Image (spheres, rainbow, N blue to C red):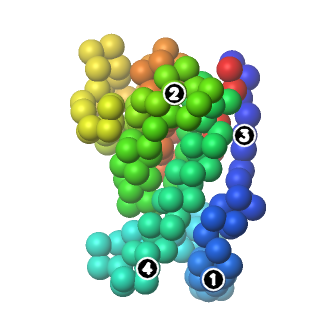
Amino acid sequence: MPTRFDIATSEFEAHLGAEAVRLLKNAFLALLAENKSVDQASQQAFSRFFKADASEGDRAIAALIVSAVARIWSRRAAAATLAMVHCDSVEFARALSAAIAQELLPEGYSRAGDKPRVAFVVAGEIRVWRDGEETGLGEREPTGRGIKRDELLQAARAGSFDILVNVNALRCPVLSKTP
């Protein structure tokens, strides 16, 4: 199945604004200076905004980050049969999954006007939203800690999900899949 890797850096930065981008960049660079790996620095730079004890300013930036990614996904969803978003932290992935589950599929999508079917996947944890409500997995969808990447992707390709949000669980930084 043809796949399109799509990194939306400039769109993301435009939605966030210069000040929020500067904060993220400075946090990332400071973590790199502490001899963190690129992956560790990226994860820690983002996760700070999504922590339970985050400051009011950090929570506002978290909301901007989620909103930016949700808007970018929404604009691109009509051209995709399945989208996968890779997040750098579990907290970010949870917040993004819940937010996207409340969006409406855009014009041009086969189920335009409906809420997307969202799967949140982190290692063995799977959460699913259908019609804007968190539900369990369907009968024909993979379950349990032994879930295999291919099984989940097969369920998604079969139309069980419109979007997969993951944190290293699927080890694939795909942002969208073309028909």
Q: Considering only order in the chain, which callout, 4 or 1, is on the residue closer to the N terminus?
A: 1
Give the side of residue 162 with respect to residue 136, left or right. Answer: right
Q: Position of residue 146 (x, y in %)?
A: 34, 30
Q: Secondary structure at mark 2?
A: loop
The residue under label 4 is 58
Q: Amino acid at mark 4?
A: Asp
User: Sequence-wise, which precedes: disc 3 or disc 1?
Assistant: 3
Q: Quadrant of the N terminus?
A: top right
Q: Secondary structure at mark 3?
A: loop
Place of residue 128 in the rendered image (x, y in percent of width and height, measured from the top left): 33, 35
In the image: residue 80, left or right of residue 127:
right
| As drawn, 70 above or below 159 | below
How many residues crowd around disc 2 within 10 Å: few (fewer than 14), some, or many (20 or more)? some
Which residue carries the number 1 mark? 19
Could you say which disc has been placed on residue 5 in the image? Answer: 3
Marks 2 and 3, Cα distance to the nearest angstrom?
Answer: 23 Å
Q: Earlier in the sequence, mark 2 or mark 4?
A: 4
